[in-house]
Image (cartoon, rainbow, N blue to C red):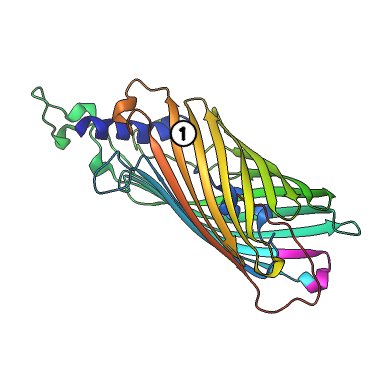
Amino acid sequence: MKLRLYALLAVVLSTFTINAQDIHFSQFYSSPLTLNPALTGNFNGFYRITGIYRNQFPGLTQNRPAFSTPSVGVDFSLLREKLKTGALGVGLVFFNDQQNGKTFNQNQILGSVAFNKSFGSKSQFQLGLGFQGGIALTTMDFSKFQFNDGFNADGSYDNTYNAETYNEGSRLKGVFNAGIFTKLEFIQGMRFYTGFGFNNATRYKQNFLANSTAEFRLPFRYTLHGGFEFDIKDKLVLIPGFLFQSQAKAHESNFGLTAGIHVVKDPAKRATLFLGLWNRVNTKNYTIIPKVGFEYKGFRAGFAYDAHLLQQRADRKNIGGAYPQGFEVTLSYIGQLFIPKEDNYLFNPRY
């Protein structure tokens, strides 16, 4: 267990000495406000409530999550009748990212605003632009760390010999993100969409060791995402898609296919079962991600399971096992407070 703990702490520390990635989700479209600010208010309804929970390497530590990220958000699609072919989106999202029982713990709360506009006689083309700002509160629990200076010859540890000094307390920082989203419907039932997100514009400092002369600033993060939707004879919908993220020297590619089977075909009572198989590739591992979801009258629920098939670490048996795992659960609801006078449709990407 000690070996696992030391390995985990090394991973945690590496996030501050190596340009590592921000949070990420396998079901990234189920968390639209953390994916791209331009998706704020971009749905066919008045309000949307979303929730997602990710747990990575669940068997690594005892009685606490090794890496966990819950997030909840709410956004509204406003002024639809006045804008006729567009909407003003406003939203709020919160997420918590923690490692090894809050050894590292970050909370962010972000407000979003976006403008989405459709063009063409049948709204074939859609363009959205969004901005997001808020605060990040980051803490480190150094009581859970052991440094080389504190070890005695017999292997015991004495914290009084630790030569490291560190900044105590919370770190409150400003965050700013921006994004753009487009959708094009070639023919009825065939749509292509893509978006681009720019995160961490403020590049706030992350200095935890007080005696360090180095200055660590959070790197910019760039996200490109997109996909297709093919409706097949009102029986089936195919959704191939992709996501690419880059942050400093860390890169991640996601791609896959989700198929939705309309188990209830009546448009007024439609229920759809989704099954998907996705892949994640980065510089250290290859992950296969099966997904399952269900949609009915504005409700969406989903589950994804990450199976890391290639873990390029010598100590991989001590970090989540030979094939480290992870899982996500999601739930969202799109609702109306009143029946709209006009059908001002805005496309909402899925799975």
Q: Nearer the viewer, residue 175 or 37?
A: 37
On the question of residue 223 being in view, the answer is yes
Q: Is residue 348 left or right of residue 67?
A: right
Q: Nearer the viewer, residue 186 or 200?
A: 186
Q: Mark 1 sits on what residue?
A: 215
Q: Residue at x 35, y 37 (%)?
A: 209
Q: Residue at x 48, y 41 (%)?
A: 205
Give percent across and percent down for residue 294.
Answer: 55, 57
Q: Is residue 236 magenta?
A: no
Q: Is residue 86 magenta?
A: yes
Q: Is residue 349 above or below residue 265?
A: above
Q: Is residue 306 above or below residue 120?
A: above
Tell me the quarter of the picture where residue 91 sits.
bottom right
Q: How many marks?
A: 1
Q: Is residue 152 left or right of residue 318?
A: left
Q: Secondary structure at mark 1?
A: loop
**Label 1: few (<14), some or many (≥20) within 10 Å?**
few
**Numbered range of the magenta stretch:** 81-88
Give percent across and percent down for residue 308.
Answer: 44, 32
Q: Is residue 213 above or below residue 77?
A: above
Tell me the quarter of the picture where residue 201 sits.
top right
Give percent across and percent down for residue 240.
Answer: 67, 41
Tell me the quarter of the picture where residue 119 sits.
bottom right
Q: Quadrant of the N terminus?
A: top left
Q: Residue at x 30, y 27 (%)?
A: 317
Give percent across and percent down for residue 5.
Answer: 25, 35
Q: Nearer the viewer, residue 3 or 270?
A: 270
Q: Residue at x 76, y 58 (%)?
A: 116
Query: Can you name the residue that lies furthest to the top here?
Result: 314
Indicate the amino acid at tag 1.
Answer: Glu
Query: Can you name the residue that lies furthest to the left here?
Result: 154
